[in-house]
Structure formats: C-alpha cells, structure tokens
Amino acid sequence: MSKKLKVIAIGAHPDDCEYCFGGSAAKYIQMGHEVCFVSATNGNAGHQTLGRLELAAIRADETKAVSAISGVSYVVLDNDDGNLTDDLETRDELIAVIRRFNPDMIFTHRTNDYHTDHRHTGLLVQDASFLLGVPLVCPSVPCMEHVPVILSFYDAFKKPVAFQADIAVTIDDTMDVKVRMLDCHKSQFYDWLPWIEHESDQLPAAKDDQYRWLNDKMRCKDAAVANCCRTKLVERYGQDAGQQVQVAEAFEFSEYGKSLTAEEMAVYFPF
C-alpha cells in the first residue's frame, strides 16, 4: 500500500453513511485505510413512538455496534434531527471535527435532496471546504495543510441538478458487510422506516427473516446504482468485469476539493 488514506464520510443521521458508503468504507478498511463516519445530528426524531432522549441513546448505541463489526470510528454530533441548519456554530463544530481527523477524502450528501438535514449537511461541508485551511477560523484546532478530495454520495434526485456519476465502484465483495452495518440500526430499518414508508405490512416478524428482507432491499437498491452507472463501471473495470458488477456505489466530485490526476485516482480509489 503506497499511501494510507484517511477517509471521512459525513451523513446527516446515524445510518446515512452506511446506506450511501458502507460497501466502499468496508473496502478501504480491509485495505488498511482509516475510515471515520460522522453524523451531523443525533437522529432523535426518527421514530413513531419513542421520545427524543430515549431515541438518541438508542441510536448512539447502534453506531457503537457499527464500529464494533466494521472497524470504522464514529462521531455523532448532538444536533437535533430535523432541525439542522448551516449556521456558524454548527459549521465551526464540523470544521473542528474534520480538522481533528485530517482526512484525505470527504464524502457527504449533495445539497439538493428530499431531506432538510441532508441538504444542510451538504451545505455545511461545502461552506467548510475552504475554511478548513484558514488558521483564524476555529483557531483552537490547527488548520489543515492540504486540500482534501470532496465527493457526494449517489442520489436519484433530478431537480434542480441531477447527480453526475464521476466514479462508480463495485461492492459485490463487501455487500454483506454493508448489510450487517445497516442491520445494527434496528430502530430504523425494522421500525421507523417501514412505518414512515408504509411498508410495515411487508416486514417479516422473525428476526432472521427481517435480516433477509433488509438484505434483499439493499441489494435491489445498489443493483439499481450499478445499472444506472454501468458505463462508469465498464470504464473502470473493463467491459467484461464492468458488466458483471451486481451492486455498486457511485460518487460525484466536488469542485471545492482537490482534483485528482489519473495516477492519483488509482491511489485514492485502490479497488
């Protein structure tokens, strides 16, 4: 391994990084790189019956379970779910978190998305991008001396601007790890999301069957990503291998981050 990478994924809620980046995160970790997940909120609104305090504690425990099985480090910021804004205090809080980790790469949400917290997380990273290297902003934490690569998670939203896949990667070999990470978020995938998406009647009663149900749903979702980004997969892996990819994750580069040469692409995406 020529360079040990430090990779940070910043989601709005506990489970966002796993959902959008879990397979790639597992690949980086398996190759000896360091990965940190950050949740910009504590996730304390995502339930139909539990109160905010109880839910925040449950969701914090779920992130610890993710760390235990995957090797990612996890930071959960104590901002209320559903109330995230790109105000100065929150921006400085996120700048400090990023600087302490000192990443080579940052992955996050795009700024057009269905969820207000997703949009504001993307805006917070966008607004922080230049300031990461400004010493007089957040002077209590040393500024970064390099410009990180910044990328957006895949999404299917079209307006005002559709996602443009700059790179797609196979996660065929790490899909099982991704699903195990998501399975740690039981309050979400077996309770809240089926309820809010009106799919509770589809959720099996037995725990083993619930896991298989989640696995099927996630494989279907990431198969759609692979099919949508097939051209990029073929470009990356060649015609035969690219056509055989079953599940994938895809990302869009931000012009606010470091640009990569073809040689650097092989270093930053070594899989």
Image (cartoon, helix red, strand yellow):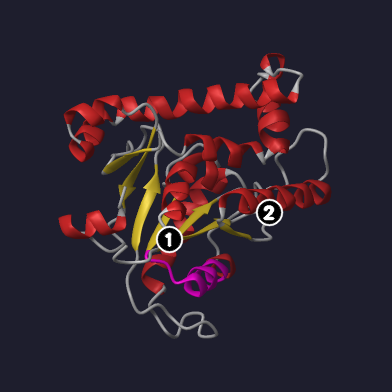
- Answer with left or right where residue 138 lies relative to residue 52: left
Res. 187 image quadrant: top right
Residue in view at x 76 percent, y 19 percent: 205
Where's residue 180, x and y in %? 60, 38
Name the residue tied to disc 1.
33
Frontmost of labels 1 and 2 is 1
Name the residue tied to disc 2.
64
- The answer to whether 227 is drawn above or below residue 110 in the figure is above
Which amino acid does the dot numbered 1 rest on? Answer: His
Question: Mark 1 or mark 2, which has the lower sequence index?
Answer: 1
Asked whether the viewer can see residue 155, the reply is yes
How crowded pointer 2 is (Cα within 10 Å; few <14, some 14-19, many 20+) is rated as: some
- Answer with left or right where residue 266 lies relative to residue 271: left
Task: Point out the stretch of residues depicted in magenta.
Answer: 92-104
Badge 1 marks a residue whose secondary structure is loop
Res. 165 image quadrant: top left
- Identify the main secondary structure in magenta: helix
Say which mark, if any, is on residue 129.
none
**Residue 195 is a magenta residue:** no
Residue in view at x 74 percent, y 51 percent: 61
Where's residue 157, x and y in %? 40, 33
Please identify the quadrant where the N terminus is shown. bottom left
Residue in view at x 68 percent, y 36 percent: 188
- The answer to whether 70 is drawn above or below residue 249 in the figure is below
